Amino acid sequence: MSEKFAKALELLTEYADLEKQMADPSIHADAGKARQLGRRYAQLGPVVAGYRAWKKSEDDLTAAKELAETEPDFASEIPALESANSEAAEKLEELLLPRDPNDDRDVILEIKAGAGGDESALFAGDLLRMYLRYAEKQGWKTEIIDATESDLGGYKDISVAVKSKGNPEPGKSPYAKLKFEGGVHRVQRVPETESQGRIHTSAAGVLVLPEAEEVEVEINMNELRIDVYRSSGPGGQSVNTTDSAVRITHIPTGIVVSCQNEKSQLQNKESALRILRARLLAVAQEAQEAAAAAERKSQVRTVDRSERIRTYNFPENRISDHRVNYKANNLDAVLNGELDPVIQSLLEADKAAKLSAQ
């Protein structure tokens, strides 16, 4: 067997072991454990199928070559079998590429207005609608966790959870699809507040966090400082007469999370803890994995117009992703959730980079 496919045999053994574990009724008493096993089983399924297809094509080719030595008629079948074997080997090689460990996770998207004031906040709202519509097309569930609206109806910042239904196929989960959306998104258009018709440039930042499960990140409540205050609406206008807004500071890391979206202090506290858990998971992974750290650092924290990953040009109806030189004149469709072509171009570039590194 090809040495480069030796890894596949290890995964086949793991797959068989998972089947045995999942057949045990007692495993389903622990929902978290059952979900973890199901997720890994779904991950390995395509690899197992790819290996079996390659092995069959390899055996068919070997058999045809042996038969051709005694029966020349079989020689005519060899070119087609060689082609099928080559295709199966190429597909298996792709399936065995290193996977991002977060690819099967749900995400928390954070969108923050940056340079550009009210126009930037309006653009943050446009990005939110784009991602909500894309999520709807993918069959995902979305939930607004926290939001701070601007005076003109946009968002100064907003956090939204994006969740898949059940165990999605590998590569179909929210993180697998959205992980390259992190960074600075720049917009060029005539703002609603512009009376002279001049095109302005502003920006909004997007951060993509893989959502952590409670069992993965343990939060010591003694390491938290929890402050409560009255929530406010656009322009600082009070929208609540009780101290329902919550600010949580994680003292060891200095991470601060605020939530005021709900009327209940308890609900805001739960939402803030959920975001904190995702951020702590990201910090832990950065410390453990140099590769993950490099990827996460590419998601720009400061929304600077000069550090952009993508430009949305309204006058020309054009979207440009500067990392892969992707350009298309269908901005209206993209903002309506037709994100697959640009996302696919980023995934293809990532796959090509991994193949070249083999």
Image (cartoon, grey):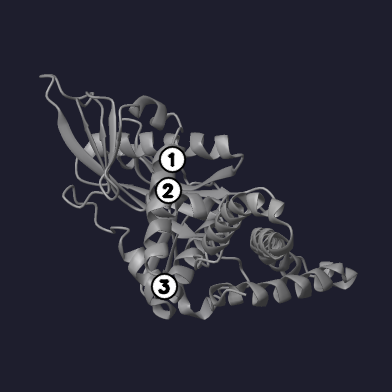
Say whether residue 353 is visible. yes
Q: Is residue 45 above or below residue 119?
A: below
Would you name the residue on which mark 2 appears?
A: 231
User: How far across and how far down the image is residue 42, in percent?
Assistant: 68, 60
Amino acid at the residue labelled 2: Ser
Q: Secondary structure at mark 2?
A: loop
Would you name the residue on which mark 1 appears?
A: 239
Viewport quadrant of the N terminus? bottom right
Alpha-carbon span between mark 2 and mark 3 = 28 Å
Q: Secondary structure at mark 3?
A: helix
Say whether residue 110 is visible. no
> In the picture provided, is 51 more to the left or to the right than 194?
right
> In the picture provided, is 76 more to the left or to the right than 272?
right
> In the picture provided, is 4 more to the left or to the right than 299?
right
For residue 321, which quarter of the picture?
A: top left
Tell me whether the residue at label 1 lies in contact with that at label 2, contact meaning CB atoms closer than 8 angstroms. Answer: yes
Circle 3 residues within 10 Å: few <14, some 14–19, many ≥20: some
Would you name the residue on which mark 3 appears?
A: 283
Alpha-carbon span between mark 3 and mark 1 = 34 Å
Viewport quadrant of the C terminus? bottom left
Asked whether 282 or 125 is in front, the reply is 282
